[in-house]
Amino acid sequence: MATSPGRVLFVCTANICRSPMAERLLAHALKNEDDPLNALKVDSAGAAAYTGDPASPNAVNALEKVGIPLDDHRSKPVTEELMNDAVAVFCMTEGHREIIRGRFQGVPEHLYLMREFLPEEQGREIPDPFGADLSSYEACRDSMVEAIPPIIRFLRRAI
C-alpha cells in the first residue's frame, strides 16, 4: 500500500453535519482514483466542535441514502496538527475560513471553500442544515457532491 501523500481536511462549525458528510463523500470518491489520490487521508474537524459527538441523525440518514456510512463518526476540534498535515483545507463558509486565519499561526497555503472551484454563479458557501429536516441535509449533501469533481481535479494538480 502506498504511503499517504497527506491529508485533506474539511472544516465546519461543530463537526457533526457538513464536514463529516464532506469527508465521507470525498473519501468515497477517492477510492476510485489512482495513486497518489487514493492514498490521501480525508478528515474533518470543527471550528467550535466538542470531542466525541456523533454525527447529526439527519447527516447519517442523508449519506445512508447514497450508501455511505456515517454512524461511526465522532466530532473533534480543528487543531494545529490537523492543519499542518493538510495538503488542502476546505471550509463550508467564509466564516470558517476567517476563524482558521484568526486562530492559527501556520494557516495552510491551500485554504479554500469546498465549492470554490465551481463557477461563481453557483454559490460558494454551504449553509448549515443543523436542526432542519432531512430534505435540507439532502440538499446540503448534493451541493457537496457537486463540488467533489472539481476538488479531485485540484488535488491531482496539488499533490
Image (cartoon, rainbow, N blue to C red):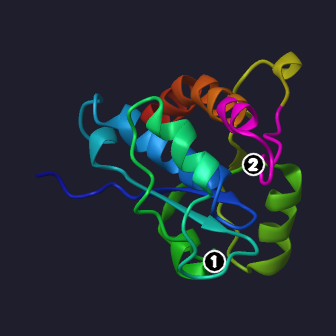
On screen, 45 above or below 117? below
Q: Is residue 110 visible?
A: no
Question: Which residue bears the numbered disc 2?
Answer: 92
Residue sitting at x 47%, y 68%: 85
Residue 131 in magenta stretch: yes
Residue 101 picture location, percent across and down: 81, 68
The kind of secondary structure element at disc 2 is: loop
Left or right of residue 94: residue 46: left
Residue 147 picture location, percent across and down: 62, 28
Residue sitting at x 76%, y 64%: 13
Q: Residues within 10 Å of mark 1 (few under 14, many from 20)?
A: many
The kind of secondary structure element at disc 1 is: loop
Picture quadrant where residue 76 is located:
bottom right
Q: Please, what is the three-letter code of the amino acid marked with disc 2? A: Met
Q: Please, what is the three-letter code of the amino acid marked with disc 1? A: Pro
Number of residue marks: 2
Q: Is residue 103 visible?
A: yes
Q: Which mark is residue 77?
A: 1
Residue 105 picture location, percent across and down: 74, 80
Residue sitting at x 60%, y 80%: 80
Q: Main secondary structure of the magenta part?
A: loop
The stretch of residues the image draws in magenta is: 124-138
On screen, 40 above or below 37? below
Residue sitting at x 50%, y 70%: 74
In this orientation, which residue lies closer to the viewer: 62 or 97?
62
In this orientation, which residue lies closer to the viewer: 82 or 157?
82
Q: Residues within 10 Å of mark 2 (few under 14, many from 20)?
A: many
Left or right of residue 77: residue 99: right
Q: For marks 2 and 1, give the CA distance.
A: 15 Å
